[in-house]
Amino acid sequence: MTRMRSLISALSAILLLSSVAACGSDDEEAPKNVSAKTAALGTLTPGVIKVAVQPYAPYTSVQDGRIVGLDGDILAAVSKKLGLRIEPEVTDFAGMLAGVQSRRVDITVGGVAWSAERQKQGLFTDPPYYSPPAMAVRSGKTYKTVDDLKGLDLGTVEGYVWVKSIQAVPGAKLHAYPDATGVFDDLGAGRVDVGFLDPLIIIAAQKERPELRISTEYLTPPTAAEVKAKPDYAYFQPYQTGFYLPKQATKLEKAISEQIDAMYADGELKKLVEKYGGDPEQFLRPAADVAGARRGVDRPQDWTPPFIAQ
């Protein structure tokens, strides 16, 4: 997302992407009966969309050659409308980005956060959803603002950008773990007060590990004044995700963005977010700064981020 983990070198990532490709190759023949409209999208293989993903359920995972999870379901709906067959390639987060930037794949999905730096090396679709600042807390505990976090034991995964935010909270103690399991284990044992993780990960853990007695809360984003005083608080704000494509894939990006926007309008995205336990009001309404971040950068000055109707 930021997908908030340390990146290995680009060269290693490209090699990893090559070695663990789930299926297919650049030499694979195109499916028969590909329409001219689909072929004009410019995918590496006409009629096929090659997708780099990492195992990150319930956002993305590959089962029986299919991408499942929230991002997988969104891409499947879009690809069906565009006449494209999905071909997944499994890698890690660094490999996802490197595969797109070197144009070894057509796209990567899985909560990749939009940033001005990343868009210089690739194209982002309109946001398929927005990722709110979620907290795993022990049931019965309530924390709403950054001030509520002062002096607490706060956990997250090593390399996630929440590490910087936590370190900026006065009196808070950072607990960094190799993966989300460590965060949940210590939260359940009372060694951590709050765990910062991607929201659907927390929601899934509530269902799969009821003995932990945890719940999901959403942090009230810090104000502009608070972020100005402590810039690392910016990571406590919601961020916009996007499907990420090579710079050359302008037609494909436009077509996918149009389908994403249509899924906001017809209620399909709302259904998919609810399928995975998410709150559409949190996932499908942009924060105030989303438009300003992209206008004049990779969107026109009058761009309006997609959102669900009331």
Image (cartoon, rainbow, N blue to C red):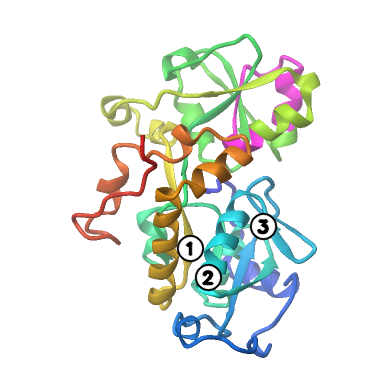
The residue that label 2 is drawn on is 100
The residue that label 3 is drawn on is 54
Q: Amino acid at mark 3?
A: Gln
Image position, residue 25 (x, y; %): 69, 83
Region in magenta: 182-202
- Where on the picture, by quarter, is residue 91? bottom right
In the current view of this chain or complex, which residue is farthest to the left? Answer: 301
Label 1, residues with CA under 10 Å away: few <14, some 14-19, many ≥20:
many
The reply to whether the C-beta atoms of the residues labelled 2 and 1 are less than 8 Å apart is: yes
Question: Is residue 6 on the magenta stretch?
Answer: no
Image position, residue 137 (x, y; %): 62, 19
Q: Amino acid at mark 1?
A: Tyr
- Where on the picture, by quarter, is residue 29? bottom right
The residue that label 1 is drawn on is 244
Q: Residue at x 65, y 53 (%)?
A: 60
Q: Is residue 137 above or below residue 285?
A: above
The reply to whether the C-beta atoms of the residues labelled 2 and 3 are less than 8 Å apart is: no
Image position, residue 239 (x, y; %): 42, 42
Q: Is residue 176 above or below residue 4?
A: above
User: Which of disc 3 and disc 1 is earlier in sequence?
Assistant: 3
